[in-house]
Image (spheres, rainbow, N blue to C red):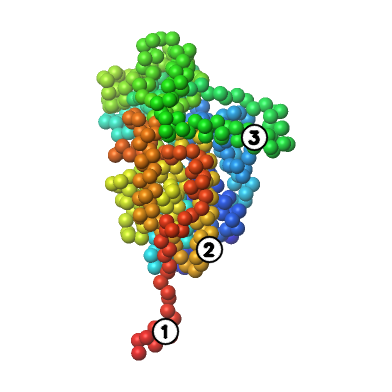
Amino acid sequence: MTGQIDRERHGRTVRHVRVAVIGAGFGGLGAAVRLRREGITDFVVLERAGAIGGTWRDNTYPGCACDVPSHLYSFSFAPNPEWPRAFSGQPHIRAYLEHVADTFGLRPHIRLNCEVRSLRWDTERLHWEIGAADGDYTADVVVSATGPLSDPRIPDVPGLADFPGKVFHSSRWDHGYELRGKRVAVVGTGASAIQIVPGIQPEVARLTLFQRTPPWVLPRADRAITAAEQWLHSRVPATRAVRRGMLWGARELQVGLFTKWPDQLGALERWAASHLRKAVKDPALRAKLLPDYRIGCKRILLSNDYYPALTRPNVDVVASGLAAVRGSTLVAADGTEAEADAIVFGTGFRVTDMPIATRVTGASGTTLAQEWKNGGMAALRGASVPGFPNFLTIIGPNTGLGNSSMILIIEAQLNYLADFLRQLGTIGGRAALDARPSATRAWNRRLQQRMTRTVWNTGCDSWYLDEHGRNTTVWPGSTGEFRKVTRRVDIAEYQVLRAPRVRSAATVAQAAR
């Protein structure tokens, strides 16, 4: 069994583990697999929900699917030769994660319905004190894998609280509410919304889309993967590796356009504009849907049925954000009004202000959220924050991608985690590694300098930017480069902390004479 009973605190049993992982999505499960492969079994995975899967557990809206090819959106150490489609849907991805948990024996380590309420660093004992729903823990190392797409963001719209109909976020879909025959408003035009709109359009009486900014949309090259392909990938693993390598290589070749030469993205814009023209013949509607910013500044979306759905007689596109709710009347910023029985928010997540940060208290007694309040999120190599020893994030600040698979980033960070633990083992005894402020500043200064020439900083208002206009989300390079810079822990970038030496009672008595 993982962990051991350490002591009682405030009448609660405290269990000590070497590593505590927070979250059981791709990042948390990947960390658990890596720990076991490193020979570490003294760990727990604390998951607030009643099942594993992270964002692929939470997002069950109609049409939910991944916009990264299946064979690239999976762990390299857990290939799946039986993906049913080139771009798999939510049920298949969640089933894949369940398979990973079973295959690698992770179930005994996972604690479901175990929300982490507090994390506090003990400077004397050099460990983390964790307050969780099922009791208290202490851990030498904490790995935060809560993910940036876990806590929904719903805008503060005047009058929303008095709306008489149904309101829910795309990641909290209410399957008990019947949309058929209803007047439904969809707020937002991000990756979820462009899947929801065609998913519900055929059954609703009226669909009103509140679009603050139109997205660039490219065709989605999706198709069923044949039984012959699945058989070949299963029997000849090299073919599976070649397919994954080709998918990875094609995206690596695109990186320079996004990070160095965004002015060369015109051809991609013309392709997207052609995709729009073919689907939408009405010039007035087409004008509403054509973006006026550089493609890639916001996330590029993939869909073959979004534009056709918007041309249907029961759909209205309001080219303005939702500004107010007056009873069952929704009012856009441009004054347009629409009646609705239900509102679906596809307004994204709390990406630049991770909610877990308010619950993590470091060595100085301040929370991670307080540390990040003025300058925005920042971490050494996307993983470590000064003043928060032995605390690592998976998908931390500036580790996001604009054109490839986040699983590649996660695996790179798992390499970093593994070497972090090896370094602690080499140091020996009760010790901790705390990122040096100077190293963290240098890392983020170089990162932000590189960010200035990327497409994400060309002027649009995207979820990549925080409230200060600083890009704290995206990695301004290739996945290959990120893997290289996180392959090993540079011990010079850390301070080594050691627990105070505990003197015996006899020694103390002798010193008192």
| Spatial separation of the CA atoms under disc 3 and disc 2 | 37 Å
Residue 432, image x, y percentages: 44, 62
| Spatial separation of the CA atoms under disc 2 and disc 1 | 29 Å
The label number, if any, that marks residue 242 in the structure image: 3
Residue closest to the eye, 317 or 383: 383
Residue in the image at 43% along x and 40% along y = 475
Residue 5, image x, y percentages: 51, 65
Residue in the image at 48% along x and 54% along y = 489
From what the image shows, is residue 8 above or below residue 166? below
Judging from the image, what secondary structure is the residue with disc 2 in? helix
From what the image shows, is residue 170 above or below residue 26? above
Q: Considering only order in the chain, which callout, 1 or 2, is on the residue closer to the N terminus?
A: 2
Give the residue type at disc 3: Val
Residue identifier under label 2 = 425
Residue identifier under label 1 = 507
Residue closest to the eye, 202 or 471: 471
